[in-house]
Structures are given as C-alpha cells and as structure tokens.
Image (spheres, helix red, strand yellow):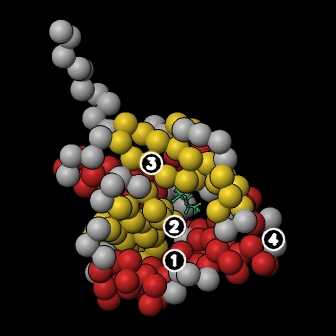
Amino acid sequence: LQINLRPAIEHDAPAASKVLCRSIAECCTEDYRNDPKLIAAWVQNKTPETLRGWIVDESHFSVVAVKGREAVGFAMSSRSGEVLLCYLILEVRFTGTGRAMLAAIEHQASSTGIQSLYLNSTLSAHSFYSRNGFEKSGPTVLSFGMESIPMTKPLNAGEVPYAI
Ligand SMILES: CC(C)(COP(=O)(O)OP(=O)(O)OC[C@H]1O[C@@H](n2cnc3c(N)ncnc32)[C@H](O)[C@@H]1OP(=O)(O)O)[C@@H](O)C(=O)NCCC(=O)NCCS
C-alpha cells in the first residue's frame, strides 16, 4: 500500500496519539534507554485530548501520513518555524516518509515567509535531521529528562543573494 500525506484534522487525534506513543516506544530506545520512568514522562502529554488541542490550534501546522486507512506518521510545526513533532511507527521507518513529512513542513513554512526552521532533536532523530540539512545550533538541552539537540535549517538556501 502506498503512503500518502495530508493535513491533519481534529478527527485524527486518537490515531496521532497512538503513532506518537508507538514511535517513542519503538524507535527512540537510544533516548530513554529502557528507563520506564523516562518513557512514561515522555508519552504522558501525548493523549488524544492533547493532540486534538494541538491539531485545532491555528498557530500549528500538522500533517498525517496514512497507509490505507491506518495513520503511520505524524508531524507538526509552529507558525514561528519550530518543528514540534516528527514521528513514524517502526514499520514505515526508512521509507522516505519522515523526509516527506519534513518537506511538507518546509513547504508550508516557506509559503508563509519563514526563513529558517528550528527544533530540539532526539538523539534517535539527529542523523535524520542532519541528512536533511539541519545543523546543530547550540549546546545539548534536557527535555523530559533526556538529552536533546537544538538544530536549525535555513530555508530557500538555494537562492543566490543579490551582490551589491
Ligand atoms: C525521525 C523519523 C521521523 C525520520 O524518519 P526516517 O524513516 O528515519 O527517515 P526517512 O523517512 O527519510 O527514511 C529514508 C532515509 O532512511 C535511510 N535509511 C535506510 N535504512 C536505514 C537504516 N537502517 N539506518 C539509518 N538510515 C537508514 C535512507 O538512506 C534514507 O536516507 P536519505 O534521506 O539520505 O536518502 C523517524 O526515524 C522516527 O520516527 N524516529 C523516532 C521519533 C523521533 O525521534 N522523532 C524526532 C523527534 S524530534
């Protein structure tokens, strides 16, 4: 089955919650290192109710990846250009779906005049963001008790600036 992306709607909240919790449990072992307390703190705010609020928040842009009728990925950015979430379930990891969700966020941000994206990356996703043009922008910070890496990417990097 082909994987398609579309903007998330309120109705996607329960499925998005499930994707985030599964992705954290299945794909982020490098971050929580089998510590049940860390994983519990991390998934605690990823409930269907919280997701519903985030999706309908007009300062957010959210995209869902769907395979057949099943949600397999979810990503979200803020109006200011912060990549807030980018998660896939294990079965569709390394299929280009993460790159496609990020491209959707980049496209939407560029279209609203955003000049650069920024985020705090998990250790698990650091190489993914590096492959996709992000660079470390500061010292490691703590998020949910785990290390996270501030990264940034200029948009429209292909444009040649005017020489004066
Ligand atoms: C971050 C995440 C969404 C990225 O998705 P992804 O599947 O890694 O990346 P893509 O969908 O772009 O997969 C294609 C890439 O995987 C690469 N790849 C394939 N097999 C691989 C492997 N075994 N190990 C590493 N990379 C591999 C391919 O070479 C391709 O790279 P390219 O873009 O240079 O061509 C996903 O890894 C994930 O959900 N991680 C856990 C959640 C997380 O930490 N999210 C970030 C929160 S800040």
Horizontal and vertical percent position of residue 91: 56, 69
Badge 3: how crowded within 10 Å, few (<14), some, or many (20+)? Answer: many
Query: In the rendered structure, are the residues bearing label 2 and label 3 in contact, judged by CB atoms less than 8 Å apart?
Result: no
Task: Name the kind of residue labelled 3 in the image.
Answer: Tyr
Q: Secondary structure at mark 1?
A: helix
- Check the image and name the residue furthest to the top: 164
SS class of the residue under badge 2?
strand
Q: Is residue 156 above or below residue 143?
A: above
Q: Residues under labels 2 and 3: Cα distance?
A: 19 Å
Q: Disc 1, disc 3: CB below 8 Å? A: no
Question: Which of the two labelled residues, at mark 1 and mark 3, occupies the earlier sequence position?
Answer: 1
Could you classify mark 1 by the number of other residues whose Cα lies within 10 Å: few (under 14), some (14-19), or many (20 or more)? many
- Eyeballing the image, is 92 above or below 9? above
| Mark sitting on residue 19 | 1
Specify the amino acid type for callout 2. Answer: Leu
Q: Is mark 2 within 8 Å of ligand 1?
A: yes
Q: Quadrant of the N terminus?
A: bottom left
Which of labels 1 and 3 is toward the front? 3
Q: CA distance from mark 1 to mark 4?
A: 19 Å
Looking at the picture, how far across and down is residue 77, in whole percent?
37, 61
- Mark 4, secondary structure of its residue: loop
Residue at point 67%, 47% (across, down): 140
| Element type where label 3 sits in the image | strand
Question: What mark, if any, has residue 118 been given in the picture?
Answer: 3
Label drawn at residue 77:
none
| Mark closer to the chain start, 2 or 4 | 4
Q: Earlier in the sequence, mark 3 or mark 4?
A: 4
> In the rendered image, which residue does mark 2 sit on?
88
Cα distance between the residues tagged 1 and 2: 7 Å
